[in-house]
Image (spheres, rainbow, N blue to C red):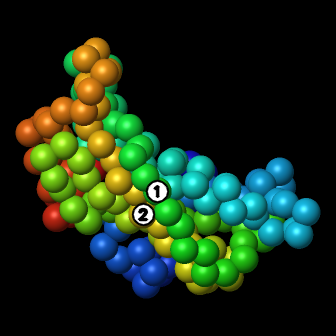
Amino acid sequence: MSGEPEAGLEGSFLAGFPVVISLPVQWGELDAYGHVNNAVFFRYFESARMEYLERCGLVESYKRDRIGAILHSTGCRFRRALFHPDTVLVGARVTQIDEDRFTMAYRVVSQRRREVVADGTGVVVVFDYRRRTKTKLPEAVRAAIEALERGGGS
């Protein structure tokens, strides 16, 4: 994460996203057409997802109990091309919690152009890495997600 989010962009484009990170667009992320390659957006989502998982305690759960997250599926709706130089704000939130998984939404905003450039989704399964099988979402993590989504945690 680098840089401070530009005032106003979080409120206008990222309202409802409790986790927002700032990432510089790297020259090496451009493709032959001169814009950020589509695959890079999934890395942006991953960075925001990992920040979210850190804040809700799932990273610590993995370190302690080997109960962690595994990405089941992901998708992206590309809205606008993204160019260098720029900085993006990437928001992450949980939109649904089930017994052994949760669904996330992502949004990528160009600070330079002041517009949404992509929206994404991801289904994250809770995984027991010792037993090599999916498992229930730990109650403490569920509570932390719910608090984060209410604006009461970080």
Horizontal side of 63 relative to 82 (left or right) equals: left
Task: Say which residue appears at 73% left-offset and 67% top-offset.
Answer: 86
The image quadrant that residue 149 belongs to is bottom left
Task: Say which residue appears at 83% left-offset and 51% top-offset.
Answer: 28
Where in the figure is residue 138, as x and y percent of width and height? 13, 35
Task: Say which residue appears at 34% left-offset and 59% top-offset.
Answer: 104
Q: Is residue 6 above or below residue 102?
A: below
Label 1: how many residues lie within 10 Å, few (<14), some (14-19) or many (20+)?
some
Q: Is residue 123 above or below residue 69?
A: below
Where in the figure is residue 118, as x and y percent of width and height? 56, 73
Q: Amino acid at mark 1?
A: Thr
Label 2: how many residues lie within 10 Å, few (<14), some (14-19) or many (20+)?
many
Horizontal side of 13 relative to 123 (left or right) equals: right
Residue 60 shows up from this direction:
no
Q: Amino acid at mark 2?
A: Thr
Residue 132 shows up from this direction:
yes
- Residue under pointer 2: 121
The image quadrant that residue 20 belongs to is bottom left
The image quadrant that residue 12 belongs to is bottom left
- Residue under pointer 1: 74
| SS at circle 2 | strand
Q: Which residue is more in the foreground, 27 or 81?
A: 81
Q: What's the mark number on residue 93? A: none
Distance, label 1 to label 2, CA atoms, is 5 Å
Outermost residue, front direction? 133
| SS at circle 1 | strand
Outermost residue, right direction? 32
Outermost residue, top direction? 130
Q: Pointers 1 and 2 in contact (CB under 8 A)?
A: yes
Horizontal side of 46 relative to 140 (left or right) equals: right
